[in-house]
Image (spheres, rainbow, N blue to C red):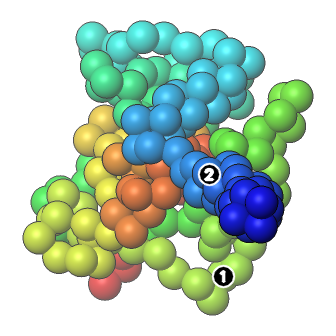
Amino acid sequence: MKYLQNILKLLAVVIPAAITMSSCSHTKSYAELLNDETKYINAYLADQRVIGSVPADSVFLQGENAPYYRMDEDGTVYMRVIKDNPDGEKAKYNDLVYMRLTRYNLYSYANGTLPEGEGNNDNPLTQFNFRYQNMEITSSSQWGEGLQLPLDYLHYDCEVELVIRSQAGMTDEIASVIPYLYRVRYTKSKI
């Protein structure tokens, strides 16, 4: 009888502990995180006008109400052109390009409202830059391919909004699987 009581006491401790451990230890798989990322990007883009490809002539509609263009088949980057400088210079390989940006975590987008952004748009002392298309150096590759993509089509002094999936975003954030909306202005180095 005492043996049965000890087993019941042990079970009374072990079962709740096992239930607690199993409920706390569930972390999302990478596939689940990617599905969540798609869901949040779709939620943001559902409130926008989206065109499924880059214009054949690479002439983008511009302005605050311009559509987002899906920039690749996988939908890793969507771009809205706020303004371009068609008379301006195009970036060339290894040009030093400066960015002023604000980015918004799309996981926090709800009811048509963006969360508070972060970046250097409001801080003239902070400079973000990269060497265009030179992914051999960390100062360029750290930004990911998504932030450099607009300069494949547009000119210096352009301004865009970009929806970027994690795999095309900042390299140290790929594993986080967080989609961001970026508002970016690109300028050429005066050096």
Pick whichever, 64 or 191, lies toward us: 64
CB atoms of marks 2 and 1 within 8 Å: no
Where disc 1 sits, the SS reads: loop
Query: Pointer 2: what residue?
Result: 22
Left or right of 184 on screen, residue 175: left
Looking at the image, which residue is at 28% across and 14% down?
Answer: 57
In this view, 6 is above or below 91: below
Amino acid found under the numbered disc labelled 2? Ser
Where disc 2 sits, the SS reads: helix
Asked which quadrant contains residue 9, the reply is bottom right
Looking at the image, which residue is at 31% across and 24% down?
Answer: 74
Q: Number of marks in the image?
A: 2
Q: Residues within 10 Å of mark 1 (few under 14, many from 20)?
A: few
Q: Does residue 91 appear anywhere in the picture? A: yes
Looking at the image, which residue is at 33% across and 69% down?
Answer: 142
Q: Earlier in the sequence, mark 2 or mark 1?
A: 2
Q: Return the x and y of residue 161 as percentages of the image width and height.
A: 57, 41
Q: Return the x and y of residue 153 as percentages of the image width and height.
A: 31, 36
Pick whichever, 33 or 106, lies toward us: 33
Query: Pointer 1: what residue?
Result: 124
Label 2 and label 1: CA atoms lie apart by 49 Å
In this view, 116 is above or below 97: above
Q: Residues within 10 Å of mark 2 (few under 14, many from 20)?
A: few
Amino acid found under the numbered disc labelled 1? Pro
In this view, 135 is above or below 113: below
Left or right of 76 on screen, residue 145: left
